[in-house]
Image (tube, rainbow, N blue to C red):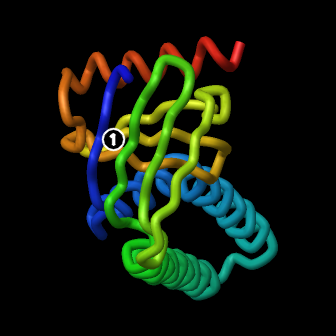
Amino acid sequence: MMYETRFDITENHYKEFLWSHFWHKQALKYGVIFFLLMILVYIILLSEFSQFWIWIGMGLYAILLICVLFITMLIKMHRVTKIAVRNYSKNIVMLYHQDTLEISYDIKGMPAKSTSPYAAFKTVTVTKNLILLYRSHNIATLVPKNSLVQGNVDEFIAFLKENIHRQNQ
């Protein structure tokens, strides 16, 4: 065994993960596409109608729509966080061997255990307080940085990146 982490996932961990994941991967991309489409609509409308009030109305509509989408995203993030913390976040022990990752955890009070080769993970992303081990574009294993039982966090991250990269070649 090279490294060991022990932790419970908290609501703050999930919030940091969701904020990082959706902001960097999806929301920014869709926001730019939406903004470009709105500019296109403005150009079409302004070329057809030169009335000032139509332009103002479309601008207010765009602002309202962006606010509604943002609030909807925050509500969904809150709901997902509550469900995840309640059901899947207790007594997590992760043992990082040279070729495999062994995870022990409680699901709704029942103990469970799994072993995965590092090849099951595609990439490592580091946030302020978390190390995210992505299995796919949308599925990640959360590891709080402060959960490392022994060793240096930077060396641990380098160990994960090296093993995931080596096994995915």
Q: Work out whether residue 67 can be spotted.
A: no
> Where residue 39 sits: x, y (%)?
66, 61
| Secondary structure state at the residue bearing disc 1 | loop
Q: Determine whether 58 is above or below 121 in the image.
A: below
User: Which residue occupies 73% across, 61% down?
Assistant: 40
Mark 1 Cα shell of 10 Å, populated few (<14), some (14-19), many (≥20): few
Is 19 or 165 nearer to us in this picture? Answer: 165
User: Would residue 103 be found to the left or right of residue 138 on screen?
Assistant: left
Q: Quadrant of the C terminus?
A: top right
Q: Work out whether residue 169 can be spotted.
A: yes
> Where residue 145 sits: x, y (%)?
25, 39
| Residue behind mark 1 | 127
> Where residue 163 sits: x, y (%)?
53, 17
User: Which residue occupies 35% across, 64% down?
Assistant: 15
Q: Determine whether 151 is above or below 133 in the image.
A: above
Q: Quadrant of the N terminus?
A: top left
User: Would residue 131 be found to the left or right of residue 59 on screen?
Assistant: left
User: Which residue occupies 75% across, 78% down?
Assistant: 49
Q: How many marks can you see?
A: 1
Is 138 or 49 nearer to us in this picture? Answer: 138
User: Would residue 33 be found to the left or right of residue 126 on screen?
Assistant: right
Identity of the amino acid at label 1? Thr
> Where residue 7 sits: x, y (%)?
27, 53
**Quarter of the image where one finds residue 54:** bottom right
**Quarter of the image where one finds residue 90:** bottom left
User: Would residue 54 be found to the left or right of residue 49 on screen?
Assistant: left
